[in-house]
């Protein structure tokens, strides 16, 4: 028997490194310009006020949080003689294209809470980590704000806000022939970024 019970999803957020570098670069430019203006301007306060006003929006820092509420879980299946599929729908049901012999266990779609501290639209991307050669994850489904997406990255999504929005993730797991008996833990990545205006 092949026990596919622990499908782990490792969520990652948009990298804050680029934002921090931009912030440092902008602050450095601001200090340099202020010193330059104070030395060469008869009205040092006027250009400084203008510069502060125009640079401040560029130094804004935002964050996106992803919290796993329910780990995605696949049912128990017999080892296949050829490649077989387990289709886990975003509503936690098994899809009609499931061809693996299911012998028990529970199955749950992954559920996540996404939060953002800005009002910008977001993009969500789902990708397989391909960390288990004998189990391939593909054909992801995402339910967000009562709409189901199956093409990724999904862009222009409403911002979840600071209170957050729940999303559910389903996918197709292809169990290849020659898969070893035991527990397999294929993983996928949820990548959430803010859309740039």
Image (spheres, rainbow, N blue to C red):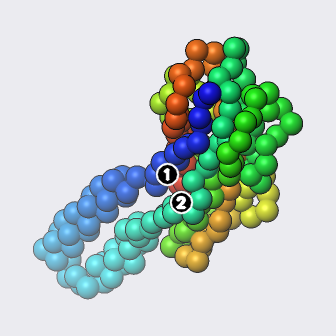
Horizontal arrangement in the rendering, residue 133 relative to residue 102 (left or right): left
| Percent position of residue 68, x then y | 53, 60
Q: Residues within 10 Å of mark 1 (few under 14, many from 20)?
A: some
Mark sitting on residue 11: 1
The answer to whether residue 31 of the structure is visible from this angle is yes
Mark 1 falls on what kind of element? strand
- Label pair 1/2, CB-CB below 8 angstroms: yes
Q: Nearer the viewer, residue 67 or 3?
A: 3
For the view shown, which residue lies furthest in the right direction? 96
Mark 2 falls on what kind of element? strand
Question: Residue 6: which quarter of the image?
Answer: top right
Mark 1 or mark 2: name the one nearer the start of the chain.
1
Mark sitting on residue 68: 2
Q: Image quadrant for the N terminus?
A: top right
Q: Is residue 25 above or below residue 162?
A: above
Q: Nearer the viewer, residue 90 or 178?
A: 178
Question: Residue 30: which quarter of the image?
Answer: bottom left
Q: Nearer the viewer, residue 156 or 74?
A: 74
| Percent position of residue 62, x then y | 44, 67
Q: Could you give the CA–CA distance between mark 1 and mark 2, rounded to whole angstroms? A: 8 Å
- For the point 26% across and 61% down, the residue is 24
Horizontal arrangement in the rendering, residue 25 relative to residue 67 (left or right): left
Question: Residue 57: which quarter of the image?
Answer: bottom left
Q: Is residue 110 above or below residue 57?
A: above
| Percent position of residue 110, x then y | 63, 53
Q: Is residue 64 above or below residue 150?
A: below
The answer to whether residue 29 of the structure is visible from this angle is no
- For the point 66% across and 37% down, the residue is 76
| Percent position of residue 69, x then y | 57, 63
């Amino acid at each position: 028997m092949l026990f596919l019970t622990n499908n782990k999803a490792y969520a990652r957020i948009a990298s804050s490194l680029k934002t921090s570098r931009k912030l440092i670069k902008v602050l450095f430019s601001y200090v340099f310009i202020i010193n330059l203006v104070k030395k060469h301007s008869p009205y040092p306060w006027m250009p400084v006020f203008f510069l502060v006003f125009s640079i401040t929006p560029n130094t804004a820092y935002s964050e996106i949080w992803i919290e796993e509420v329910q780990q995605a879980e696949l049912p128990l299946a017999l080892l296949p003689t050829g490649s077989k599929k387990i289709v886990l729908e975003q509503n936690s049901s098994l899809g009609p294209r499931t061809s693996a012999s299911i012998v028990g266990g529970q199955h749950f779609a992954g559920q996540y809470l996404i939060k953002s501290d800005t009002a910008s639209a977001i993009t969500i991307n789902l990708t397989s980590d391909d960390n288990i050669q004998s189990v391939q994850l593909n054909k992801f489904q995402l339910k967000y704000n009562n709409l189901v997406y199956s093409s990724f990255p999904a862009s222009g999504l409403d911002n979840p806000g600071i209170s957050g929005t729940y999303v559910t993730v389903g996918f197709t797991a292809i169990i290849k022939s020659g898969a070893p008996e035991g527990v397999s833990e294929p993983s996928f990545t949820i990548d959430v970024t803010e859309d740039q205006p």
